[in-house]
């Protein structure tokens, strides 16, 4: 099993798709192409329409400014702090911790920027357009990460943990598997710690409250951001429908979780000394 929705793997992208994938990574300053873009690449003209329409929102710096406002307002579902040495006890040494934190940071940045810009593509125009923000345009290339793992690459126990984590904040019929958990499957012990940390927050409703807050914040920004988009091309309705599905659900779900995991893992690394 790879992606549970149709998607073009980065390694398999060619031609114009490869060019757009590379442009996305360069513009956002991330080492991975998030699943929404890889899914849009399966639609004839979908990826090109979505990226050409949304790119000015990113390059203007407005997506980054909106992301910063969202981060300042959002209350993420924070797990209890780990005791020093917890990561090493589950087989995550200092180098593995560094790489795992880089994985989380990559998805955190990509998801947060995409939530702002892609929500704009499905939001009616409202308010005044934000001013371009100097100095926050293209971020440049980021360091490469280990490959995303699929079901056949890991043990049955690890894959069950990936699927269990994907239920946090998700709908009962959720069709999309968040790629972050597959990427962190290199470290099964870390997945187990994450599950133990997030499970009480899912049970209490804190995860879902944070997701709802992220959705509201993104929608509040979207009406202004859409005014920076390139909208001369005809709207690609299947792509827009997929963007609505992803932005309102899986991306919105993974933004507060990603923010929480980033802070939690950085604190754990500091505690390990």
Image: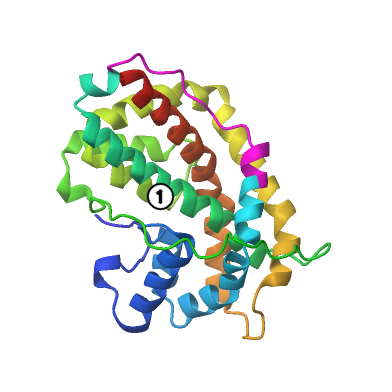
Using the image as rendered, state which of residue 94 and residue 218 is in the foreground.
94
Per the image, is 80 magenta?
yes
Per the image, is 76 magenta?
yes
Using the image as rendered, state which of residue 102 and residue 148 is in the foreground.
102
In the figure, 170 relative to 234: above or below?
above
Q: Answer left or right for 121 relative to 144.
A: right
Furthest-top residue in this view: 83
The quadrant the N terminus occupies is: bottom left
In the figure, 104 relative to 120: above or below?
above
| Region rendered in magenta | 69-85
Q: Can residue 119 be seen at all in this image of the molecule?
A: no
Q: Secondary structure at mark 1?
A: helix
- Name the residue: 42% across, 72% down: 23
What number of labels is visible? 1
Image quadrant in which you'd find residue 272: top left
The quadrant the C terminus occupies is: top left
The spot of residue 122 in percent (x, y) is 66, 65
Name the colour scheme.
Answer: rainbow
- Name the residue: 38% across, 36% down: 165
Q: Can residue 114 be seen at all in this image of the molecule?
A: yes
């Amino acid at each position: 099993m790879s992606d549970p929705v149709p998607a073009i793997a980065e390694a398999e992208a060619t031609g114009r798709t490869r060019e757009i994938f590379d442009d996305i990574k360069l513009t956002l300053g991330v080492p991975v192409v998030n699943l929404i873009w890889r899914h849009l690449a399966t639609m004839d003209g979908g990826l090109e329409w979505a990226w050409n329409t949304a790119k000015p929102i990113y390059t203007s710096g407005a997506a980054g400014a909106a992301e910063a406002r969202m981060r300042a307002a959002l209350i993420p579902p924070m797990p209890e702090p780990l005791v020093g040495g917890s990561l090493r006890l589950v087989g995550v040494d200092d180098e593995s911790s560094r790489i795992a934190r880089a994985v989380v940071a990559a998805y955190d940045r990509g998801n947060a920027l995409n939530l702002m810009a892609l929500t704009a593509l499905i939001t009616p125009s409202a308010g005044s357009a934000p001013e371009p923000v100097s100095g926050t345009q293209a971020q440049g290339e980021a360091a490469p990460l280990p490959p995303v793992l699929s079901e056949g690459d890991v043990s049955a126990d690890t894959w069950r943990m990936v699927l269990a984590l994907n239920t946090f904040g998700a709908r009962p019929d959720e069709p999309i598997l968040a790629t972050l958990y597959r990427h962190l499957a290199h470290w099964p012990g870390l997945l187990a710690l994450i599950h133990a940390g997030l499970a009480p927050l899912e049970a209490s409703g804190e995860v879902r409250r944070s997701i709802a807050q992220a959705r509201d914040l993104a929608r509040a920004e979207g009406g202004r951001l859409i005014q920076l988009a390139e909208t001369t091309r005809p709207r690609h309705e299947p792509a827009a429908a997929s963007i609505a599905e992803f932005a309102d659900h899986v991306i919105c779900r993974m933004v507060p979780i990603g923010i929480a995991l980033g802070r939690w893992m950085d604190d754990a690394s500091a505690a390990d000394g």
